[in-house]
Amino acid sequence: MIFIKKFNRQGWRNLLLLVFLSGTLSQLFASRIELNEDDKIYPLLNRKSNKIINYYELKPGDTLHAKTFEVDSLEVYSRFIINGNKEHNYSYHIKINDEVRMVERTAAASKVTRGLNGDEVSSYNLFTAAISSDNSLVSITNKSAHKILFKISGNNVISEYRVIDYIRYSPQEYGEERVMMFDEKSYTYYAKADGSIKLVLEGPIVLKVMSRYVFSRNYVNTKKYRFRVYDNNNLIGEYEETAHKSGEAYLLDEEEKILSTGDANILKLAKGVHHLDIENRDNNLDVIFRFYISKSSVKVEQK
C-alpha cells in the first residue's frame, strides 16, 4: 500500500521553495566560464544550421581574460578575419593559471560560417587543455598582425548555440514581386526599384535575408553578386555571394530564366527603430530577395 502525505497550504509553499532553491543552487554551482570582454562580442552565422555563435574579437596585442568554475578540460576555438588577408597563419599565447603556451595555427576560409556583417572568416581551430584546479584563471593574447576570434568552452559547459524560429516579412518599398516555385509551393521574392528595397523594423529583432540570382537560360557558369545593407543610412553589412544554379526551384511564368540556390544572411538589430535599405551593388544583375524576422520578436496584442 502506498501512503500519500497530505500537505496544507504552508506545506506546499515550503515544498515549492525547496524546489526553487534546489534549481537555483544547481545553476549557481554549475560548470561555467565567465569572461569580462562583453564589448568585444563578435557574432558569427553558420549558414547551414542558422545558428548564431558568439566569438570574441581580439586585435593584435590585446588580451582576453576568463575564469573557469568546475571545468575539467578547456576548449579554445579560434578563427581569424580574412577580408583580403593573404596570410592564413596566426598565433596566440594562452595562460592557464601559471602555465603559458604558444599556439600557432593555419586555417583556410570557412565555406559555411561568416560574420553577421558579411566579414569572411576562417574555419576554426581547436586547442584543448586539461585543468587540474576547480577554479582557474585563463588569459589569451593575440600575437598576430591581424584580428583573431576566440570562443572559450569546456567539456562540461552547456552549449550557447541558439536556433531561431522565423516568420516571413514583407518590405515596405520594392520594385516588383517574383514568385518562386519549389516542391509545389510558392514563395514571394522581391526585386529592387530604381533605388533599393526598404524595410522598417523595431528592435531588438533578428532579420534573415534570403537572396537568389536569376540566370539566363544560356548562362552555364556560376555567378558572383553583391549587396549592401544600410541601417538609418549607415552601412552595416556588405555581402558577396557565389550563385549556383538550382535543380528544383524556378520562377513562375518565367521559363526563360533559371534560379540559383538560396543564400542566407542574418542581421541582429538592437533596440529602436531601423530604416533598412537593401542595395543591389550590381545594377545589371538580376537579384531577388525574401525576408524573415525572428518569431520571438513579434508581439501579439489581445483585446
Image (spheres, grey):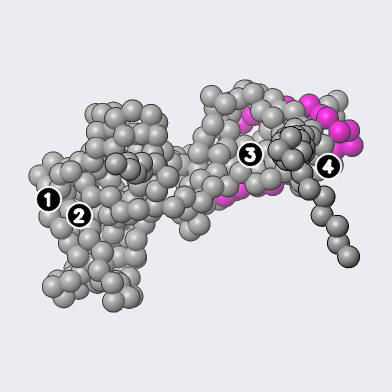
Between 148 and 34, the one nearer to me in the picture:
34
- On-image quarter of the N terminus: bottom right
Query: Secondary structure beneath disc 3?
Result: strand
Query: Quick check: marks 4 and 3 in contact, CB under 8 Å?
Result: no
In reply to whether residue 51 is colored magenta, the answer given is no
Asked if 301 appears above or below 211 in the picture, the reply is above
Circle 4 sits on which residue? Answer: 72
Query: What is the crowding at mark 3: few (fewer than 14 residues within 10 Å), some, or many (at least 20)?
Result: some
Which label's residue is closer to the chain start, 2 or 4?
Answer: 4
Q: Is residue 207 visible?
A: no
Circle 2 sits on which residue? Answer: 190
Circle 1 sits on which residue? Answer: 175
- Which region of the structure is painted magenta? 123-146
Extreme-left residue of the structure: 194
Query: What is the crowding at mark 2: few (fewer than 14 residues within 10 Å), some, or many (at least 20)?
Result: many
Query: Quick check: marks 2 and 1 in contact, CB under 8 Å?
Result: yes
Which amino acid type corresponds to the residue marked 4 in the rendered image? Asp
Which amino acid type corresponds to the residue marked 2 in the rendered image? Tyr
Identity of the residue drawn at 20% across and 69% down: 251
Identity of the residue drawn at 27% across and 54% down: 290
- As drawn, the label of residue 151 is 3
Which amino acid type corresponds to the residue marked 1 in the rendered image? Gly
Which amino acid type corresponds to the residue marked 3 in the rendered image? Lys
**Residue 163 x %, y %:** 51, 51
Alpha-carbon distance for marks 1 and 3?
42 Å
Alpha-carbon distance for marks 2 and 1?
7 Å
Query: Quick check: marks 3 and 2 in contact, CB under 8 Å?
Result: no
Which label's residue is closer to the chain start, 2 or 1?
Answer: 1
Query: What is the crowding at mark 1: few (fewer than 14 residues within 10 Å), some, or many (at least 20)?
Result: few
Which label's residue is closer to the chain start, 4 or 3?
Answer: 4
Query: Quick check: marks 1 and 3 in contact, CB under 8 Å?
Result: no
